[in-house]
Amino acid sequence: MMGEFARFILEEDAQTTAEYALVILGAAAVAGALIAWAASGKSVKGFFTKIFDKLTSGF
């Protein structure tokens, strides 16, 4: 009886780990898509260029 209970707990831990891994992979995919979208647009690049220019010019 105790062996079956221990096996159930270990299987549940592995499932939780797999679920966390899938969530992290999904978040990385969304972040990658967002970065690719932002890099392809001129408006985002211009926005960061303006911020960098203000920072280096001393306001």
Image: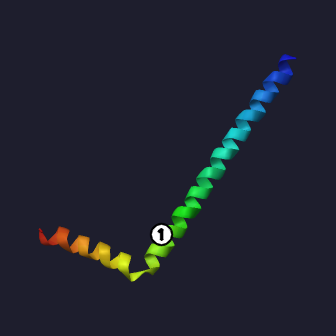
Residue that carries the numbered disc 1 in the rendered image = 35
Image vertical order of residue 23 relative to residue 57, above or below? above
Q: Is residue 56 found left or right of 1 in the rendered image? A: left
| Image vertical order of residue 7 relative to residue 33, above or below | above
Indicate left or right for 57 with 48 as reference.
Answer: left
The color scheme shown is rainbow
Residue 28 falls in image quadrant = bottom right
The quarter in which the C terminus is drawn is: bottom left
Q: Which residue corresponds to the image point at 24% horizontal and 70% vertical from the top-left?
A: 51
21 lies left or right of 55: right
In the rendered image of this protein, does residue 38 appear above or below residue 8?
Answer: below
- Who is closer to the viewer here, 42 or 13? 42
Q: Amino acid at mark 1?
A: Ile
| Element type where label 1 sits in the image | helix
Q: Position of residue 15 (x, y in %)?
A: 73, 40
Which residue extends farthest bottom? 42
Quadrant in which residue 6 is drawn: top right
Q: How many marks?
A: 1
Q: Residues within 10 Å of mark 1 (few under 14, many from 20)?
A: few
Query: Looking at the rendering, which quadrant does residue 9 occupy?
Result: top right
- Residue furthest out toward the left: 58
Residue 40, percent across and down?
Answer: 46, 80
User: Where in the figure is residue 18, as x and y percent of width and height?
Assistant: 69, 45
Residue at the image point whose x is 53% and y is 66% from the top: 32
